[in-house]
């Protein structure tokens, strides 16, 4: 984690003033064959396009194996922690996703990072709810590989 470049907030309430703004980018995360293989084993998604390098080179429209879209999505928590620190936050709960798309593939060996924008902020019982617009980009590519609307709840 590159904490020198993380956005540091004293409290969750600071997100209120950031609605509509891009606020942080995460560190780069490598999607190695080993990481993709481990994800396939944990989830049971062992489709050849993720695991069989030779077949991926021959038959995949991408010319190689690619990471699972859900693997990319599952890295949001890690990428968030590298991008944003909230000193005065209590517990944070992943409340869910409103919308997720995987517009571009992530070939094995690629690096990805997320850009976080605050889409909405609201007060809920005993806490706050922040909706983030997240775009995950692949290094040296203009089209995002994952876009999501992600809701986090913070309780004191």
Image (cartoon, helix red, strand yellow):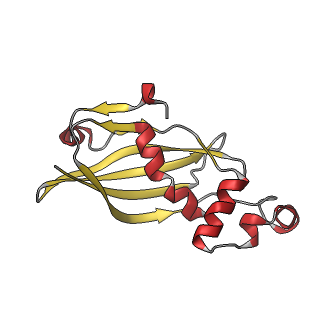
Q: Total label count?
A: 0
Residue placed at 68% from the left, 47% from the top? 110
Residue placed at 78% from the left, 64% from the top? 61
Q: Is residue 105 visible in the rendered structure shown here?
A: no
Q: Is residue 104 visible in the rendered structure shown here?
A: yes
Vertical arrangement, residue 84 with respect to residue 104, above or below: above
Residue placed at 58% from the left, 71% from the top? 43
Nearer the observer, 140 or 30: 30
Nearer the observer, 25 or 103: 25
Where does the image place residue 116, in percent across and percent down from the top left?
41, 44
Where does the image place residue 154, in percent across and percent down from the top left?
23, 52
In this view, the residue farthest toward the left is 125
Q: Is residue 127 toward the left or the right of residue 22 in the image?
A: left
Where does the image place residue 20, in percent across and percent down from the top left?
30, 44
Where does the image place residue 128, in percent across and percent down from the top left?
18, 52
Nearer the observer, 38 or 49: 38
In this view, the residue farthest toward the top is 4
Residue placed at 72% from the left, 65% from the top? 50
Q: Is residue 44 toward the left or the right of residue 147 in the image?
A: right
């Amino acid at each position: 984690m590159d904490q020198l470049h993380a956005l540091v907030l004293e409290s969750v309430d600071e997100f209120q003033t950031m609605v509509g703004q891009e606020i942080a980018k995460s560190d780069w995360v490598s999607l190695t064959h080993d990481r993709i293989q481990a994800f396939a084993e944990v989830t049971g998604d062992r489709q050849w396009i993720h695991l069989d390098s030779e077949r991926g080179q021959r038959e995949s429209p991408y010319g190689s194996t690619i990471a699972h879209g859900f693997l990319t999505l599952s890295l949001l928590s890690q990428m968030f922690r590298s991008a944003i620190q909230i000193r005065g936050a209590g517990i944070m709960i992943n409340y869910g996703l409103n919308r997720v798309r995987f517009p571009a593939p992530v070939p094995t060996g690629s690096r990805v990072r997320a850009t976080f924008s605050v889409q909405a902020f609201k007060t809920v019982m005993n806490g706050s709810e922040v909706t983030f617009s997240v775009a995950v980009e692949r290094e040296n590519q203009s089209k995002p590989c994952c876009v999501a609307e992600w809701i986090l709840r913070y309780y004191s």
